[in-house]
Image (spheres, rainbow, N blue to C red):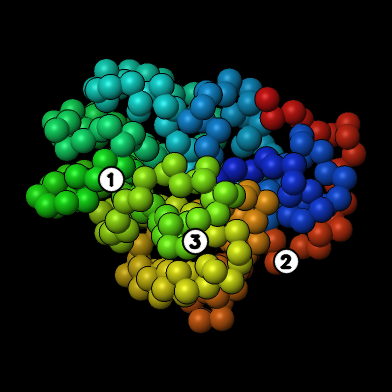
Amino acid sequence: MNFRLGCAIWAYKEWVGKLFPSGSRSSEFLRLYSRRFTTVEGNTTFYSIPDVPTVKRWATETPADFRFCLKLPRDLTHQGLLTAAIPGTIAFLERMKPLEERSGPMFAQLPPSYSPARLEDLTAFLTAFPRQQTPLALEVRHPDWFKEPYASQLNSLLTDLGVGRVLLDTRPIYDCPDDPQLQSERRKPQVPLQPVITSPFTLVRYISHPDRDFNLSYLTVWTKQIQQWLAQGTQVYFFVHCPVEVFSPQNARLFQELLEDEGVNVPPLPWNQISLSEAAPPQSTQLELF
């Protein structure tokens, strides 16, 4: 499967009756989500590291072809030099091993304070990361990474090491009038979108506008880009966020529709193959996520 589509999280109670059947319990959210989308960004690990039994439940509750693209914990990526976090990173990867084939590329999101002045530190960290066993993607946020000569230096480093590039697209929430409901996502840096491929895969984080139709022009362009990447054999993970989280699934579904309408060779979305009235299993069969 060269194209996977999903959201940043799998558990959101306001999705009940929309993405999930009415009456769904929080303990069912992962199982239900994984039968509607094919991947999840897995923001949860950025804030806390789950225990081994929880990771095992994530694996047993999801289909074999589902993929978690988990974010490295902020305690590893946001506490100064990355080289100091190498032992903790290896331990985190060991904790995630029960996911087995359900583990997609991990990704490291660096804070806006992490500048090209730390290129040597970044190189050492990426070199030490066991990329052959666990694919890795990188998201940078300091504005200098998007300027020359640092942009080319970064892309060359990632290409040489086979590390993917996380592409953050915040245009839909900045290229519009001020709106209080967008303020939370506008804390994300307004960095340039540079659709550069540095590995056999790429991760796209699309920050959608709550107004479904406002996204059409951006997603139409993304449709053509995805078609080009798939034609050249690049594996694409596309994640749809929204400042008003309740709209994330519908905006992701809109993108699937646009891809299919344009004849892009993407797998069908599982959500489109089930009924919202799908019955939830009895409570006695459910496992708590945490």
Residue at position x 26%, y 41% in the image: 142
Estimate the x, y position of residue 138 in percent, counting from the top left: 32, 42
Query: For the image shown, how many numbered marks are present on the structure?
Result: 3
Q: Earlier in the sequence, mark 1 or mark 3?
A: 1
| Residue 2 visible in the shown view | no
Residue in the foreground of this view, choosing between 119 and 217: 217
Residue in the foreground of this view, choosing between 169 and 23: 169
Residue at position x 65%, y 61% in the image: 250
Q: Which of marks 2 and 3 is nearer the N terminus?
A: 3
Q: What residue type is labelled 3?
A: Pro
Per the image, the residue denoted by label 1 is 163
Per the image, the residue denoted by label 3 is 177
Estimate the x, y position of residue 53 in percent, counting from the top left: 63, 22
Residue at position x 17%, y 31% in the image: 118
Per the image, the residue denoted by label 2 is 273
Q: Which amino acid does label 1 sit on?
A: Val
Estimate the x, y position of residue 134 in percent, counting from the top left: 38, 38
Q: Which amino acid does label 2 sit on?
A: Gln
Residue at position x 31%, y 51% in the image: 191
* 49 to the left or right of 119: right
46 w.r.t. 201: above or below: above
| Residue 225 visible in the shown view | yes
Q: How crowded is mark 1: few (under 14 residues within 10 Å), some or many (20 or more)?
A: many
**Dot 1: element:** loop
**Dot 2: element:** helix
Q: How crowded is mark 3: few (under 14 residues within 10 Å), some or many (20 or more)?
A: few
- Label 2 or label 3, whichever lies nearer to me, is 3
On the rendered image, what quadrant is the C terminus found in?
top right
Q: Quadrant of residue 54?
A: top right
